[in-house]
Amino acid sequence: MELQWFPGHMAKTRRMISENLKLVDVVIELLDARLPLSSRNPEIDNIVGSKPRIAVLNKCDIADDTANKLWLDWFEKKNITAFLADSRSGYGFSALSPAIDKVLEEKFERDRAKGIKRHSVKMMIVGIPNVGKSSFINRLSARSAAKTGDRPGVTTAKQWIRIAGKYELLDTPGILWPKFESPECARRIAFTGGIKDEIMDVEELAFYLVGFLRENYPQNLIDRYKLSDADIELESWDIVEVIGRKRGAVISGGEIDMHRTSMLILDDFRSAKLGKITLELP
């Protein structure tokens, strides 16, 4: 299954980020804590260049707690300023201001030496679709400043948002990259809803997700779908079929509605009904 999704507005966003980079002091790169590497757009490195950057591992509340710690250690070893965040509860948001002070310390020193008074810090927020940017901004600004949605592509134009008088934030639409080099990377993004379901074979996607869970989080599958030890030993397609039967996704002739079952499994993962799961490790 080859996954690509790069609609026209993403190319426009790429140009928008490049053109507006000079207007901001720091870039906030929002990542999905369940797939911190796969949700890093490799093109952002080239676009942002040497501009100070902070990595925010959003949705940490639905990622594996042990994996969260491993990823923070990984970013620290790479000398990348990073912290965990949960936009729904506000967890981790107190770490943003110290992180900004850290990455902009040299700039602040230069400004003070020149007698430049700092009025506000201008930030740009970037990330792939469905990584939670709108919810992050709304939590940061303590109001519904940006549209939110559970589908990719909700934000389609840039917008400036003032935050508590101290910061100004430039929101940009979610952006993927034209070609995924790794099918595993593409699948992880698709698992989280970062690529529109309408352009994919969701049955095959659910097959891969169940295969991953079977190998790495078998108890989560057992608990959610009341599977037996024998069920979990089956091949992934067969497990999907068992889940469909248990959930009553049966069509005429006693066949399992595999599309309906596949969407059920994907929705359960995306809403964390399958528990705290991380899709990749450092």
Image (cartoon, helix red, strand yellow):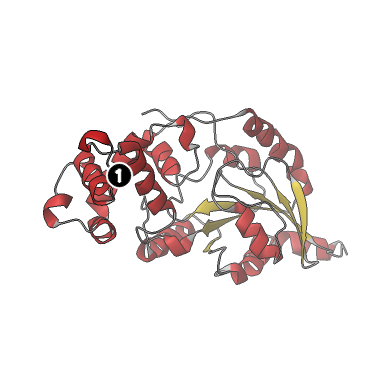
Point 46% across, 51% down: residue: 36
Give residue 237's quadrant in the image. Answer: top left
Q: Is residue 71 left or right of residue 11?
A: left
Q: Which percent across, then down, holds residue 120?
A: 80, 62
Q: Which percent across, then down, holds residue 160?
A: 77, 51
Q: Is residue 199 left or right of residue 116?
A: left
Image quarter (top left, top right, bottom left or bottom right) of the N terminus: top left
Question: How many labels were placed on the picture?
Answer: 1
Q: Which percent across, then down, holds residue 233?
A: 14, 49
Give residue 164's quadrant in the image. Answer: bottom right
Point 49% across, 28% down: residue: 179
Point 43% across, 37% down: residue: 186
Q: Is residue 237 left or right of residue 59?
A: left
Mark 1: give few (<14), some (14-19) or many (20+) Cα within 10 Å: some
Q: Amino acid at mark 1?
A: Ala
Disc 1 target residue: 249
Q: Is residue 98 left or right of residue 116?
A: left
Relative depth, front residue between 154 and 158: 154
Residue sitting farthest toward the front? 252
Give residue 206's quadrant in the image. Answer: top left
Relative depth, front residue between 70 and 85: 85
Q: Is residue 165 above or below residue 198?
A: below
Q: Is residue 261 above or below residue 217?
A: above
SS at badge 1:
loop
Q: Which percent across, then down, holds residue 268?
A: 38, 53
